Image (cartoon, grey):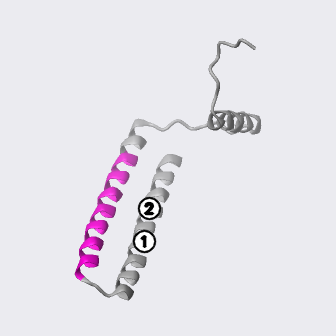
Amino acid sequence: MTDDKPLKSSIELAMERLARKDADAGVAPAAVTDTQKAAIAEVRNFYEAKIAELEVLHQAKMSATVDPGEQDTMARQYRRDRDHFTSERDFKIEKLRRG
């Protein structure tokens, strides 16, 4: 067993298995165009800015109150808003990729 090939990680092996499975099923990966890449980058930048703004506002609100109940409520609202922005971003990126 003196192969010149380096050992592969479990992730690489799994990705190869999935690629073979897709090829057997006739699923071909679609190449992303430069226009799509630019649009995706724009969407990512927009949502990164929105999430950063949300983080700054959240930190300011958290430091302005000492009530643990109110802080808990604000933390839940922050997580909900962050998750909303993240899922909205992911949806728009997937929509751009599909064309």
Quarter occupied by residue 82: bottom left
Q: Secondary structure at mark 2?
A: helix
Residue 63 at x, y percent in the picture: 24, 77
- At 40% from the left and 81% from the top, the residue drawn is 72
Left or right of 64? Residue 3 is: right
- Viewer-side residue, 57 vs 97: 57
Which of pointers 2 and 1 lies earlier in the amino acid sequence? 1
Left or right of 65? Residue 3 is: right
Q: Is residue 75 above or below residue 68?
A: above
Distance from label 2 to label 1 (Cα)? 10 Å
Quarter occupied by residue 84: bottom left
Q: Is residue 5 above or below residue 33?
A: above
Would residue 42 be counted in the magenta stretch?
yes
Q: Main secondary structure of the magenta part?
A: helix
Residue type indicated by callout 1: Arg
Residue type indicated by callout 2: Thr
Q: Is residue 71 above or below residue 52?
A: below
Viewer-side label of 2, 1 = 1
Q: Residues within 10 Å of mark 2 (few under 14, many from 20)?
A: some
- Viewer-side residue, 44 vs 67: 67
Residue 79 at x, y percent in the picture: 42, 71
Q: Residues within 10 Å of mark 1 (few under 14, many from 20)?
A: some
Q: Is residue 54 above or below residue 8?
A: below
- Viewer-side residue, 63 vs 23: 63
- At 41% from the left and 65% from the top, the residue drawn is 85
Which residue position holds label 1?
79
Residue 88 at x, y percent in the picture: 45, 63
- At 38% from the left and 73% from the top, the residue drawn is 78
Which residue position holds label 2?
86
Residues in magenta? 39-64
Residue 15 at x, y percent in the picture: 65, 37
